[in-house]
Image (cartoon, rainbow, N blue to C red):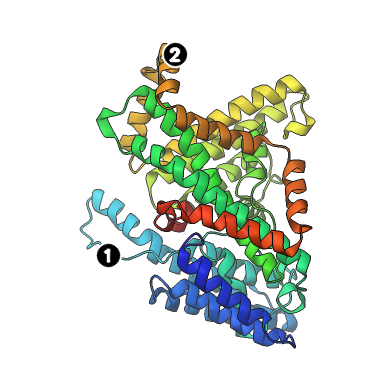
Amino acid sequence: MLFSSSVFLFLFLPVVLLVYYLPLRRWRQGQNVFLLLASLGFYAWGEPWFVLVMLGSILANYGFGLWVDACKRAGRTCAPPLVTALAVNLGILFVFKYLTFTLGILNRLGAAFVIPGIELPIGISFFTFQALSYVLDVHRDRGEVQRSPLKVGLYISFFPQLIAGPIVKYETVAQQIDHRKETWADFSAGCSRFIVGLGKKVLLSNQLAVVADRAFGQGDGLSASFAWLGALCYTLQIYYDFSGYSDMAIGLGKMFGFHFLENFNYPYISRSITEFWRRWHISLSTWLRDYLYISLGGNRKGRIRTYGNLLLTMLLGGLWHGAAVRFILWGGLHGAALALHKLWMALVPGAKATGAQMHWWSRAAGMLLTFNIVCLGWLMFRAESMQTVSLMLHQIFENFNAAMIPQVVTGYAAVFALIAAGYILHLLPSAVDAVAQRIVVHAPLVLQVLMAAAMIWCVMQIKSSDIQPFIYFQF
């Protein structure tokens, strides 16, 4: 079920909110059970059988959490439950997401395995990482073990961020499951945030996707100018698509009293690749840092080991996104860039990790370099095959003709206007966004309702809104 669909906007969400808030006397356990059932229904909407995978993950990790807690209380090593939890969770992920990819590679090396037709449960990468977070945070004393499987189920399956994040670590919401507070200010802010995210998705991302899809699907007829245009459009499309979903998820969470951490912080103004990963998909980068990079040794084992840890972490991060060589290469590109930036800071006196610490000329050069590295990576992320990546790179770097720029801008004036609007909105200071949200939150209730209705009406005029899935649904 898409957040931008009529079913969600005009049926599912209003009914869930009504039932959640209708009782005059709040009963937290009843609300949690209702949210769990609503979340499972939300997940089962498109593919009912996949909810069994979700339930299996919930029950398994509920048991692993109890096992870890029992070992800690008895003073025994927690290695057996932790290893079992990792094996089960990663095993489920491997079977559904990587088995056919692995068998295909083995077959190309001479084996003769039968490739099974396994459908990918939507959002499996996200809820698997959340499930692992629960077990690991219980082990690290970053959240109390849950004695109720229903509460573990709510944490893993909560519908606002179930399909495409942000990845919510257990330690950030452990107390909120039982002790959250719903306020009108939070509800209003949540509605405002949801509407902003909905606008990002439908009014910007979906429109940019039309051009990006044409460029990446044009094949041998692709021109250099259209390759550049497609790359720029996809760079904005994926940001407004994913950050729009994150805005809607965070906004929905606030409507029910949950406070999720931010997932994006103006990533395209990053002045280094290190800063980019502190601003882009923050929930994934912090998850990889806390549970993988640091576990590998982080930067505590010497310079060479640090670079290797960065590269391995990002390679696995790329593989997390999809079972394809292009995702591994995308992760490798970012891992190598992070390692090289770490080396640069070690060798060059005064080199800094983030733009706030740099001189103005370093910020400008760093922003330009970082943006181009990120755009280069998006080619591998978006293309359906490495042949498409090769074609795009060939057209962009070998057949580009600067003299064609005026003609291209004139021919695609509406597209460039949309791109310009996207970049301007992205580069606006955060204070502007904060002021806009305060205006909406403190507006009279009647005005808030009218603004929400007007926004939703405008969104529903765009006929493609119900058929454009979010990009990260495939992960």
In the displayed structure, does residue 342 sit left or right of residue 25?
left
Q: Amino acid at mark 1?
A: Gly
* Residue 365 position (above or below residue 255): above
Q: Amino acid at mark 2?
A: Ala
In the displayed structure, does residue 236 sit left or right of residue 272?
left
* Residue 259 position (above or below residue 273): below
Snapshot quadrant of residue 275? top right
Q: Position of residue 285 (x, y in %)?
A: 62, 50
The circle on residue 117 is 1
Mark closer to the chain start, 2 or 1: 1
Q: Is residue 260 visible?
A: no
Q: Residue at x 72, y 70 (%)?
A: 257
Q: Residue at x 64, y 48 (%)?
A: 264
Q: Position of residue 16 (x, y in %)?
A: 58, 77
Closer to the observer: label 2 or label 1? 2
Q: Is residue 371 visible?
A: yes
Q: In this figure, what is the number of numbered marks?
A: 2
Give the residue number, with chain letter if any, for mark 2: 402
Quarter of the image for the N terminus: give it. bottom left
Q: Residue at x 40, y 37 (%)?
A: 211
Q: Position of residue 364 (x, y in %)?
A: 68, 23
